């Protein structure tokens, strides 16, 4: 292990397998089950393959990483010489990966001599991915471990996450939902409603608006982002698409046009778990004031090019 610290995340970060390999990030994947077969999300089943299966109406189920999955990962990294590990997890309001990672740490043999910090990003998809990317950037730049960790935590505290879910959304499975939120979410599919969700400070999604015409959400999202830009200044941002239907691409372009594309980390294809949970055909946007992300033009983006 040549790095001052290792980086681990779950597959909700929506980054490609090639990105993880190129930047030496370890993924503890969700598992996707269909036709009595089980595949590691992103690592074995690409986002494109998962989206195609969902588009065909294939019945999928999602299995979150277990305590044992994280424990095996941490033990392997320790055996490879890692003395410090930062584990980045999706919002604990939506999945139990953060809890599983913490329980795995508690069950480790102290003699392994590995220090592990868990970050609850209070986001998913590119929100989580931006924090993973920031850790990679600060590690490449040579920041001390404590400084890199503090930088990532501060980024998580100031990051905003918006998601537009298609009528096929599954946000009703979020454990933090109230009865009213669950009821409204369940109505989306039969009524053909697209919904806009914003993540609160605890990482729980809250429905802001819903409509049968997804184009109506563009003005609302644009206004939300514009207000934040006026208050906080330039934003670094990233987006995701769950599949690439024309309407989602048009909506994403309309929203991102309000932001400076030179400050874009790129647009990714959603992992299987995010496409399954948020709904095929949806899109999302994560953004943060540029002072909270470690910036340098030669450092990795979420995708090779600024935009798709």
Image (tube, rainbow, N blue to C red):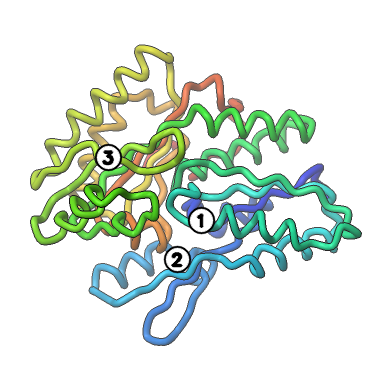
Q: Position of residue 3 (x, y in %)?
A: 80, 46
What residue appears at the point 34 percent right and 62 percent down from the top-left corner?
A: 276
What residue appears at the point 30 percent right and 40 percent down from the top-left corner?
A: 206
Q: Circles 2 and 1: CB distance less than 8 Å?
A: yes
- Could you tell me which quadrant the C terminus lies in? top left
Quarter holding residue 207: top left
Q: CA distance from mark 3 to mark 1?
A: 20 Å
Q: Position of residue 122 (x, y in %)?
A: 49, 41
Q: Which mark is residue 16?
A: 1
Q: Which mark is residue 252?
A: 3
Q: Earlier in the sequence, mark 3 or mark 2?
A: 2
Dot 3 falls on a residue whose secondary structure is: helix
Above or below: residue 229 compared with residue 135: above
Q: Residue furthest right?
A: 111
Q: Give the crowd class for mark 2: few <14, some 14-19, many >=20 residues within 10 Å.
A: some
What residue appears at the point 41 percent right and 36 percent down from the top-left corner?
A: 286
Q: CA distance from mark 3 to mark 2?
A: 21 Å
What residue appears at the point 55 percent right and 19 percent down from the top-left corner?
A: 291
Q: Which mark is residue 108?
A: none
Dot 2 falls on a residue whose secondary structure is: loop
Above or below: residue 99 compared with residue 302: below
Q: Which mark is residue 46?
A: 2
Q: Give the crowd class for mark 3: few <14, some 14-19, many >=20 residues within 10 Å.
A: many
Q: Position of residue 132 (x, y in %)?
A: 59, 43
Tally of marks = 3
Q: Earlier in the sequence, mark 2 or mark 1?
A: 1
Above or below: residue 299 compared with residue 244: above
Q: Is residue 79 visible?
A: yes
């Amino acid at each position: 292990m040549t790095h001052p610290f290792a980086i681990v995340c779950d597959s909700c970060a929506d980054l490609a397998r090639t990105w993880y390999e190129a930047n030496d990030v370890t993924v503890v994947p969700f598992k996707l089950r269909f036709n009595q077969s089980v595949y590691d999300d992103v690592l074995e089943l690409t986002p494109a393959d998962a989206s195609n299966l969902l588009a065909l109406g294939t019945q999928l189920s999602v299995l979150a990483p277990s305590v044992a999955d994280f424990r095996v990962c941490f033990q392997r990294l320790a055996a490879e010489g890692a003395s410090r590990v930062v584990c980045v997890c999706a919002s604990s309001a939506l999945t139990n990966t953060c809890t599983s990672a913490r329980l795995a740490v508690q069950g480790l043999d102290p003699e392994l001599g590995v220090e592990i910090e868990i970050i609850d990003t209070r986001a998913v998809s590119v929100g989580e991915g931006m924090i993973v990317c920031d850790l990679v950037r600060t590690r490449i730049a040579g920041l001390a471990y404590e400084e890199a960790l503090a930088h990532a935590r501060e980024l998580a505290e100031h990051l905003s996450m918006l998601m537009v879910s298609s009528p096929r959304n599954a946000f009703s499975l979020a454990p933090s939902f109230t009865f009213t939120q669950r009821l409204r979410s369940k109505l989306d599919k039969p009524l053909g409603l697209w919904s806009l969700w914003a993540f609160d400070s605890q990482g729980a999604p809250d429905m802001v608006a819903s409509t049968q015409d997804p184009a109506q959400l563009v003005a609302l999202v644009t206004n939300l982002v514009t207000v934040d830009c006026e208050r906080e200044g330039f934003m670094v941002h990233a987006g995701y698409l769950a599949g690439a239907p024309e309407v989602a691409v048009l909506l994403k372009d309309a929203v991102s046009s309000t932001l400076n594309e030179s400050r874009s980390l790129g647009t990714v294809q959603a992992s299987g778990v995010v496409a399954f949970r948020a709904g095929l055909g949806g899109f999302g946007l994560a953004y943060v004031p540029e002072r909270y992300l470690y910036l340098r033009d030669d450092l990795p983006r979420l995708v090779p090019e600024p935009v798709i």
